[in-house]
Image (spheres, grey):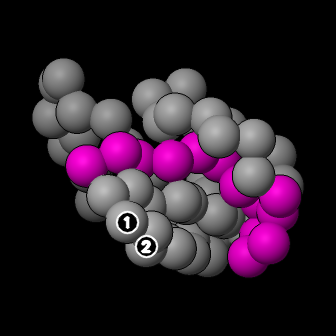
Amino acid sequence: MYLNYYDGYNTITQNSAGDITFECDSGKTHIYVSNPDYLVDSLDDENLQDSYGKYIGTLNV
């Protein structure tokens, strides 16, 4: 099976990230994963603590 990730989209892959937790906060979503080595560079870094797994960044909406 082949997964096609469309060009121009930023992704978080669950196979690599592990469990993903989304914490909704007024106008933003903080994202945590269970894999301590998982990194992305497409999210804003608000330097939050690893409250629900490893904090990987914030999506501002």
Q: Mark 1 points at which residue?
A: 26
Mark 2 sits on what residue? 24
- In the rendered image of this protein, does residue 49 appear above or below residue 19? above
Residue 38 in picture, x, y percent from top left = 71, 46
Tell whether position 29 is magenta: no
* Left or right relative to 56: residue 3: left
Asked if 39 appears above or below 59 in the picture, the reply is above
Q: Position of residue 18 (x, y in %)?
A: 64, 69
Tell me how many marks there are.
2
Tell whether 28 sits left or right of 46.
Answer: left
Q: In which quarter of the image is the N terminus?
A: bottom left
The span from disc 2 to disc 1 (Cα, nearest Å) is 7 Å
Within-10-Å neighbours for mark 1: few <14, some 14–19, many 20+: few
Question: Where is residue 22 drawn, in percent x and y?
Answer: 49, 72
Q: What element carries label 1?
A: loop
The residue positioned 82% from the left and 62% from the top of the image is 50
Q: Is residue 56 magenta?
A: yes
Tell me which residue sits at (65%, 40%) in the image.
Answer: 46
The range drawn in magenta is 49-61
Asked which secondary structure carries label 2, the reply is strand
Residue 35 visible in rendering:
no
Q: Give the answer, above or below, for where 36 lies relative to 11.
A: below
